[in-house]
Image (spheres, rainbow, N blue to C red):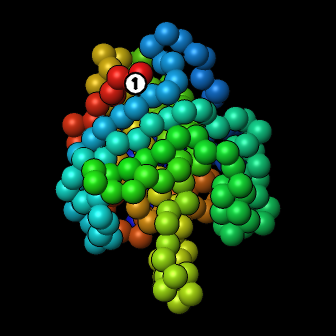
Amino acid sequence: MKRSLTAACAALAVALAWPGGLLGQAPEQKAENQLPERFRAFVANLGEVRTTADNRMMEWQITRWTTDEEEQRLFGALKEKGPRAMLQVMQDLEKTGWIRSQGGMSYDLRFARQAPGKDGGRQVTLMTDRPMGFWELSGTTVSRDYPYTVIQLASSKDGKWEGSMTIATKIEIQAGILVFEDLSSRPIQLLSVTKEKTK
C-alpha cells in the first residue's frame, strides 16, 4: 500500500515533499526533550506481513538525531541513484539508537528525525534496514524490494503518543514526492505508546 509522506499516514501527518525541505528540522535540546529518549508500545499487527514482534511489547531508544547532512546524503542517493544506493548509505550511517521486541534481539536504528506537530506536539520518524535472512536475500522474493522498517510517532500537546510501524517498506521518489510503500495492506498499530524514563 503506497503512502505519500505529504499526506496523513495512519493519523500521523509526518511528511515533507522532496525537494522543498527536510523530513524534520534538527531539534533544540530542551529540558523535556533530552536524549536518550526511550519509548514502549504494544504491537497490534492486523496485516499480512507477520513478525516475531506481533502482539507483544516493543521498545526503542533514540540516542542521537540524524543530521541535515546525513539526510541530504540519504535522500540524495535515492533521487540520483535509486533505492539500492540509498540502502547502502543508510547501512553506513552511525546508529541513532536501537529497537527490540519483548524477548527478542535488539537492532540498530539508522535514521531519527523530528518535526513540530499539531498544537504544540511532536512528530518523530525512525527508520532502519530490516534484517533479512540468507534465503530472502539470495532468492527472487518480492520482499527483497522492501528492505526498510519505518516507525512514525506523533504526540499531542499534553504528551500523549500514538504511532504506527511498517515492517517491510519500499521508499521511492515519485514526481518529486517521497513515497513509502508498505508490503502489507495495513500498517502495524502501536498501542499504548509511552515515553519511558532513562537513567
Residue that numbered label 1 is attached to: 198
Does residue 43 appear to the left or right of 83 in the view shown?
A: left
Residue for point 35% across, 17% down: 157
Horizontal side of residue 4 vs 41, given as left or right: right
Q: Looking at this view, is 26 or 106 the one in front?
A: 106
Give the side of residue 54 with respect to residue 68, left or right: left
Q: Position of residue 102 (x, y in %)?
A: 27, 50
Instruction: Name the spot of residue 89 as percent of width and height, x first.
Output: 72, 57
User: What amino acid type is highlighted by mark number 1?
Assistant: Thr
Visible residue check, residue 10: no
Secondary element at image label 1: loop
Residue that sits furthest to the top in the current view: 31
Q: Where residue 151 appears, x then y in whole percent?
A: 43, 47
The structure residue drawn at horizontal position 76% and vertical position 58%, both measured from the top left corner, is: 77
Residues 158 and 147: in front is: 147
Q: Is residue 120 above or below residue 135?
A: above
| Looking at the image, residue 5 lies above or below residue 104 | above
Q: Is residue 37 above or below residue 189?
A: above
Crowd rating for badge 1 (residues with CA inside 10 Å; few <14, some 14–19, many 20+): few
Q: Residue at x 41, y 22 (%)?
A: 199
> In which quadrant is the N terminus drawn?
bottom left
Taking the view exactly as shown, the residue that stands out farthest to the bottom is 139
The location of residue 156, given as percent across then percent down, is 34, 23
The count of marks equals: 1
Left or right for 50, reference 97: left
Residue placed at 77% from the left, 39% from the top? 69
